[in-house]
Amino acid sequence: MKKRGKHQSLTKEIKPQIEKIEKLPGVKRVVIGTTINKRSSNRTSRQNRSADKMGSLKYQSDIDSGIKIRANTSRGTMTLYVYCNDRKIVKDFINSIND
């Protein structure tokens, strides 16, 4: 599935997980949002020192046509938008890979 949006590149930590999300039933597309460099602000630095490991995905919120996900990468914190018909399938998948 082609990634749409201004940003196109994924880091090696999350690329396999995003490819699996794209193959889930009901997923229309994955849009790569902004990446906040981990050295750009104090807030982001605190966030990257958290218990979340590199490559982890975390559910953030529901959006009109899907869900918003936060990914911790070597570049910093990346925002991803998953447009789908069934949010529960994607949420369950995210929970299963983070366990």
Image (spheres, rainbow, N blue to C red):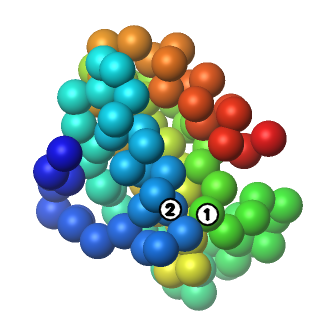
Q: Which mark is residue 55?
A: 1
Tell me the quarter of the image containing the C terminus.
top right
* Mark 2 nearby-residue class (10 Å; few <14, some 14–19, many ≥20): some
Q: Are marks 2 and 1 in contact (CB under 8 Å)?
A: yes
- Residue bearing the label numbered 2: 14
Query: In the rendered view, does 88 fall on the left or right side of 58?
Result: left
Q: Tell me residue 79's x, y (percent).
A: 43, 54
For numbered disc 2, what is the local secondary structure? loop
In the image, 44 versus 28, the foreground residue is 28
Q: Which mark is residue 3?
A: none
> Vertical placement of 53 versus 17: above or below?
below
Q: Is residue 37 visible?
A: yes
Query: In the rendered view, does 18 fall on the left or right side of 42?
Result: left
* Mark 1 nearby-residue class (10 Å; few <14, some 14–19, many ≥20): some
> Vertical placement of 87 versus 27: above or below?
above
Disc 2 to disc 1, C-alpha distance = 5 Å
In the image, 74 versus 36, the foreground residue is 74
Q: Residue at x 52, y 15 (%)?
A: 88
Q: Tell me residue 42's x, y (percent).
A: 67, 78
N-terminal of the pair, mark 2 or mark 1, is: 2
Q: Is residue 43 visible?
A: no
Judged from this view, the residue extending furthest toward the bottom is 39
Q: Tell me residue 82's x, y (percent).
A: 35, 35
- At label 1, the amino acid type is Gly
